[in-house]
């Protein structure tokens, strides 16, 4: 059963006041919130969640409308560029004789950029996977550490030789000279 327009307006006004109070940091159990007509702290909290959900649904509808409009614009541009990108055009010499055919690569680039834009707009591209690895590409060891240990790990991250941070000297015969006394 749908609420009357007056009831809907009253609910919207109460929710707007609730949101303003919450933005000001007022707790749900505060008398100012209860004075809006809520029976309890729990009722106010539930109504706040409903207000946020309604707002989220309204935003999603607006985003869907925007996405549809942008897709229609991209369709029109793609339709205009597609023939030049897919149909070879004649190549003329100085005497205006046809010496070959080629596709307009600028049109191909335009089509690819339009397709890329459409993929981004509609979320078609797969997310980029990123992997964090430990020393030598191995797994990252996770454990509880103290702040000074964490700072030490951060300072040595990526350093292949963490003992002194300096590169070893290499002799002409290719052997490493680590300046150690053997």
Image: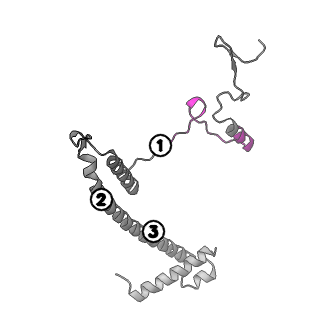
Image: magenta residue range: 128-152
The reply, left or right, for residue 180 in relation to residue 78 is: right
Q: Residue drawn at (39%, 57%), measured in percent from left and top?
A: 121
Asked whether 102 or 99 is in front, the reply is 99
Image x and y of residue 141, in percent:
61, 36
Q: Which residue is mark 2?
A: 75
Tag nearer the camera, 1 or 2: 2
Cα gap from disc 1 to disc 3, whole angstroms? 28 Å
Asked whether 90 or 173 is in front, the reply is 90
84 w.r.t. 61: above or below: above
Image x and y of residue 20, in percent:
58, 78
Image x and y of residue 171, in percent:
68, 14
Which sits earlier in the primary sequence, circle 3 or circle 2? 3
Image quadrant where one finds the N terminus: bottom left
Q: In the picture, residue 182 is in which quadrant?
A: top right
Q: Residue drawn at (55%, 79%), measured in percent from left and top?
A: 18
Q: Which residue is mark 3?
A: 56
Asked whether 93 or 82 is in front, the reply is 93
């Amino acid at each position: 059963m749908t609420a009357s327009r007056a009831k809907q307006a009253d609910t919207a006004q109460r929710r707007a006041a609730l949101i303003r109070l919450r933005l000001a940091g007022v707790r749900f159990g505060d008398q100012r919130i209860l004075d809006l007509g809520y029976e309890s702290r729990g009722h106010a909290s539930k109504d706040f969640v409903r207000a946020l959900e309604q707002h989220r649904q309204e935003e999603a509808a607006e985003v869907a409308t925007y996405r549809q409009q942008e897709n229609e614009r991209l369709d029109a541009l793609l339709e205009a560029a597609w023939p030049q990108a897919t149909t070879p055009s004649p190549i003329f010499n100085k005497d205006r004789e046809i010496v070959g055919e080629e596709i307009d690569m600028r049109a191909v680039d335009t089509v690819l950029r339009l397709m890329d834009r459409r993929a981004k707009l509609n979320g078609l591209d797969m997310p980029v996977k990123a992997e964090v690895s430990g020393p030598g590409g191995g797994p990252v060891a996770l454990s509880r550490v103290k702040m000074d240990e964490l700072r030490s790990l951060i300072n040595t991250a990526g350093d292949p030789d963490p003992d002194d941070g300096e590169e070893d000297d290499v002799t002409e015969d290719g052997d490493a000279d680590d300046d150690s006394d053997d």
